[in-house]
Image (cartoon, helix red, strand yellow):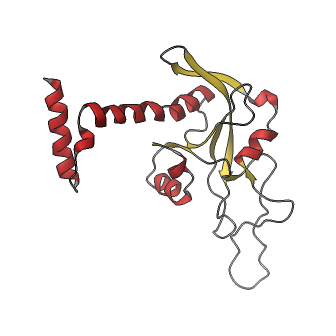
Amino acid sequence: MLADEVYGSNREFREGVRELKLSYSLAVRSTTTVWALERQPLPPKTRNGRGRQATRMRRDAMHQPITVKQLAQELAESAWHKVAWRQGSKETLCSRFAALQVRPAYGDDRKGGLQPQQWLLIEWPAGAVEPSGYWLAHLPAKASLKQLVRISKHRWVIERDYEELKGELGLGHYEGRNWRGFHHHAHCALRHTAF
């Protein structure tokens, strides 16, 4: 599943997609917080003999999550690699990317336990003042940087195709209120254009 930062920055949306056992690459805002590198939370308090064992991760002044923008600025130059992801209309599209395993941090101090590890992909074009894109990706740990980039950048192709379907094939003209009606409209629109 691919989505822009409006959906990707929503923790409940990401958790829902993960519960459906779907792979995803979702754009997130630069203010999204993660646990990465040496920044890790404190373990839950140890049991003192009464009550249940604590499960909430703890934070203090030295154990705080970091925003993905701050993390990008702290990465060494060797972490960045030039990757081309597809042929554009004039030239091959390429930029500098870095990828590392992180754990999203939002809400782990109120809920139990750490969230599962996933990829953080960061795009920082050469010569730019700051990174231009961030993605959290629930993809196999053995995925290559090129695979992460290709999958994450594929959302543009899908959006372009959808706009073309709406404009040129009439899918944007549907004003009904249910899936069945939309399905019939789409079928007729696509069938009509085939002849």
Horizontally, is 62 left or right of 104 in the view?
right
Horizontally, is 86 left or right of 179 in the view?
right
Identify the residue shown where x is 71% and y is 74%: 54
The picture quadrant where one finds residue 159 is top left
Q: Nearer the viewer, residue 163 or 92?
A: 163
Q: In this view, does 86 lie above or below 182?
A: above
The picture quadrant where one finds residue 44 is bottom right
The image shows residue 49 at horizontal and vertical percentages of 77, 83
Q: Is residue 77 above or below residue 91?
A: below
Judged from this view, the residue extending furthest toward the bottom is 50
Horizontally, is 74 left or right of 178 in the view?
right
Q: Nearer the viewer, residue 20 or 95?
A: 95
Judged from this view, the residue extending furthest toward the right is 62
The image shows residue 31 at horizontal and vertical percentages of 68, 52
Judged from this view, the residue extending furthest toward the top is 90
Horizontally, is 28 left or right of 157 in the view?
right
Q: In which quarter of the image is the N terminus?
A: top left
The image shows residue 154 at horizontal and vertical percentages of 48, 31
**Total number of numbered discs in the rendering:** 0
Q: Quadrant of the C terminus?
A: top left
The image shows residue 175 at horizontal and vertical percentages of 22, 51
The picture quadrant where one finds residue 64 is bottom right
Identify the residue shown where x is 18% and y is 51%: 180
Q: Nearer the viewer, residue 117 or 154?
A: 154
Identify the residue shown where x is 68% and y is 70%: 55
Identify the residue shown where x is 59% and y is 47%: 28
